[in-house]
Amino acid sequence: MTIEMTFEQGLVCSLLVVLLVLFAWGRWRYDLIAAGAMITVVAAGLISAEQALQGFGHPAVVTVAAVLVISRALRNCGIVDLIASKLVPYTHSTAGHITVLTGVVTLAS
């Protein structure tokens, strides 16, 4: 049984392998790798620039970006460290830390 791929399918599969290797290697930031992949598929003509950028307007993407900005702001303000320093004395193991922080995050969401 032979499996035949079109050029486009082969290019996408090759790109995915390269992406996995680059993500695992960890030398470059993941967002730069992903942006490079998007530019590659647009430059190769697999998708249009409009299609590539269309997903950035989706409410889920905007929500995730907002959560990342808010979490970074809370970390930079020291609120995360303050909460952690108040909770750590009540836990005596890594599992305890995770359990307490999961509860706090659940309530905060």
Image (tube, rainbow, N blue to C red):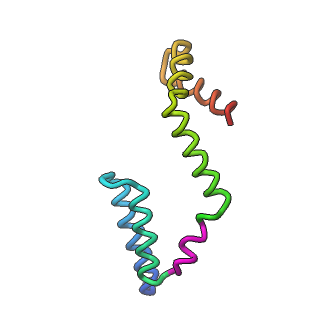
Measured as percent of width and height from the top left, residue 71 is found at 56, 39
Measured as percent of width and height from the top left, residue 57 is found at 63, 64
Q: Is residue 31 above or below residue 16?
A: above
Measured as percent of width and height from the top left, residue 94 is found at 48, 23
Q: Which residues are magenta?
A: 47-55
- Could you say which quadrant of the image residue 10 lies in? bottom left
Q: Is residue 7 left or right of residue 49?
A: left
> Can residue 1 be seen in the rendering of this structure?
no
Asked whether 23 falls inside the magenta stretch, the response is: no
Quadrant for the C terminus, please: top right
Measured as percent of width and height from the top left, residue 81 is found at 50, 25
Q: Is residue 31 above or below residue 15?
A: above
> At x 52% / y 80%, what residue is drawn?
47
Q: Is residue 10 left or right of residue 80?
A: left
> At x 55% / y 45%, what residue is drawn?
69
- Could you say which quadrant of the image residue 39 lies in? bottom left
Of 36 and 18, which appears nearest the observer? 36
Asked whether 51 falls inside the magenta stretch, the response is: yes
> Can residue 52 be seen in the rendering of this structure?
yes
Q: Which residue is farthest front?
A: 77
> At x 46% / y 70%, what residue is drawn?
38
Of 2 and 58, which appears nearest the observer? 58
Of 68 and 23, which appears nearest the observer? 68
Q: Main secondary structure of the magenta part?
A: helix
